[in-house]
Amino acid sequence: MDTLGTFMFPLLIIGIFYMLVFRPQQKKMKEHQNMVKNLAKGDEVVTAGGLIGKVTKVKAESNEVEVEVAKDVRVTVVQATIADVRSKTKPAS
């Protein structure tokens, strides 16, 4: 019985660690990837660097997005550095 307890305790700790740390992190990563994949022209975004602007062009082949941060001021950012989408454009019906 003592041997079974010796093996169960580390497995229990690993299981709790997985449930509290790894699963939420994996879920957050999937949500971020989905958000970045669904970027569209006109979305208002926030980059990881803190820039706020509107998406003017999505370059899917190079995983880049062109963001207008001020009138006629556009920067190209890597899609993965988009931290948040503040407002989505309404799809044309």
Image: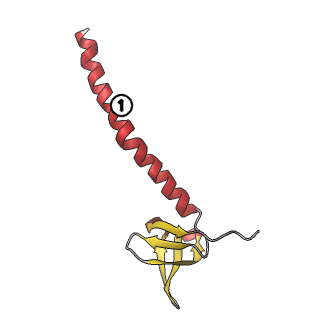
Give the residue furthest to the top: 1
13 versus 53 height, above or below: above
Give the residue furthest to the right: 93
Which element is circle 1 on? helix
Q: Position of residue 26 (x, y in %)?
A: 44, 47
Q: Residue 1's image quarter?
A: top left
At 50% across and 72% down in the image, what residue appears? 45
Give the residue furthest to the bottom: 72
Q: Position of residue 18 (x, y in %)?
A: 37, 37
Q: Position of residue 70 (x, y in %)?
A: 48, 87
72 versus 26 height, above or below: below
Q: Would residue 50 be seen by someone viewing this image from the given angle?
A: yes
Question: Between 23 and 61, which is closer to the camera in this rendering?
Answer: 23
Amino acid of disc 1: Gly
Is 38 placed left or right of 77 in the picture? right
Name the residue beneath numbered marker 1. 15
Q: Position of residue 60 (x, y in %)?
A: 59, 69
At 54% across and 60% down in the image, what residue appears? 35
Q: Count every numbered label the image shows and give the total.
A: 1
At 47% across and 75% down in the image, what residue appears? 77
Which quadrant is the C terminus positioned in?
A: bottom right
56 versus 40 height, above or below: below
Question: Between 24 and 60, which is closer to the camera in this rendering?
Answer: 24
At 45% across and 77% down in the image, what residue appears? 52
Q: Would residue 63 be seen by someone viewing this image from the given angle?
A: no
Question: Between 12 and 76, which is closer to the camera in this rendering?
Answer: 12
Is 87 placed left or right of 21 in the picture? right
